[in-house]
Image (spheres, rainbow, N blue to C red):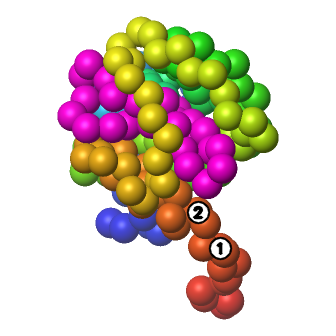
């Protein structure tokens, strides 16, 4: 059977699923289909450079951000992570990009924050040092930071509108 013609057993299971309370149905989905981890990252820009951090748990320089806690929205997570790591309070606006990495089951939500004046950064939490670099020239970025660099590069390219593949 294909997705267009599901089996009678699958259809019966879907009808039963619809009757389950939300908490139980979510637990079933999570048991059958493990979830992704999700992170929220800030591209904090000043004078053509971005704020980067050297952190205890990373090799090379990375960007402010971290994992989204359970029940937390990406916007709230990036505000929290930036404050914890840099002492800065940001208004992230809307996400500039979302990047999916299916091989490791991870999603990054990336926010862009533009600064008119150079902010005073006070590294804290797991951050050890801060610096300002052109995004493409971060020294020794780790794998997750390279993914973010790639996502930002893609986001800067004007997106093409989608289209209907099969109009029939």
Residue 90 seen by the camera? yes
Which quadrant of the structure image shows residue 128? top left
Q: Quadrant of the C terminus?
A: bottom right
Q: Which of 52/102 is in front?
A: 52
Residue 45 location in percent, x, y?
Answer: 63, 44
Residue 80 location in percent, x, y?
Answer: 59, 16
Q: What residue sits right under mark 1 in the picture?
A: 159
Q: Kindly report the distance in space between the C-alpha atoms of the residues bearing marks 1 and 2.
A: 8 Å
Q: Residue at x 59, y 86 (%)?
A: 165
Secondary element at tag 2:
helix
Judge whether residue 52 is colored magenta.
Answer: yes
Q: What residue sits right under mark 2 in the picture?
A: 155
Q: Which of 18/96 is in front?
A: 96
Q: Which of 116/167 is in front?
A: 116
Q: Which of 63/5 is in front?
A: 63
Range drawn in magenta: 40-64
Q: Residue at x 65, y 44 (%)?
A: 46
């Amino acid at each position: 059977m294909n997705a267009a013609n599901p089996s009678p057993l699958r259809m019966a299971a879907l009808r039963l699923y619809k009757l389950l309370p939300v908490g139980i149905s979510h637990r079933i989905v999570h048991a059958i289909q493990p979830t992704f981890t999700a992170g929220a990252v800030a591209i904090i820009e000043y004078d053509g450079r971005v704020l980067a951090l050297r952190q205890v748990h990373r090799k090379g320089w990375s960007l402010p951000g971290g994992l989204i806690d359970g029940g937390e929205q990406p916007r709230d997570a990036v505000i929290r992570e930036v404050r914890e790591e840099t002492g800065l309070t940001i208004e992230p606006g809307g996400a500039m990009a979302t990047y999916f990495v299916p091989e490791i089951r991870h999603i990054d939500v990336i926010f862009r924050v533009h600064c008119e004046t150079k902010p005073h950064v006070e590294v804290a939490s797991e951050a050890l040092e801060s610096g300002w670099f052109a995004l493409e020239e971060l020294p020794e970025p780790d794998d997750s930071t390279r993914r973010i660099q790639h996502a930002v590069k893609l986001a800067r390219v004007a997106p093409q509108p989608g289209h209907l593949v099969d109009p029939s």
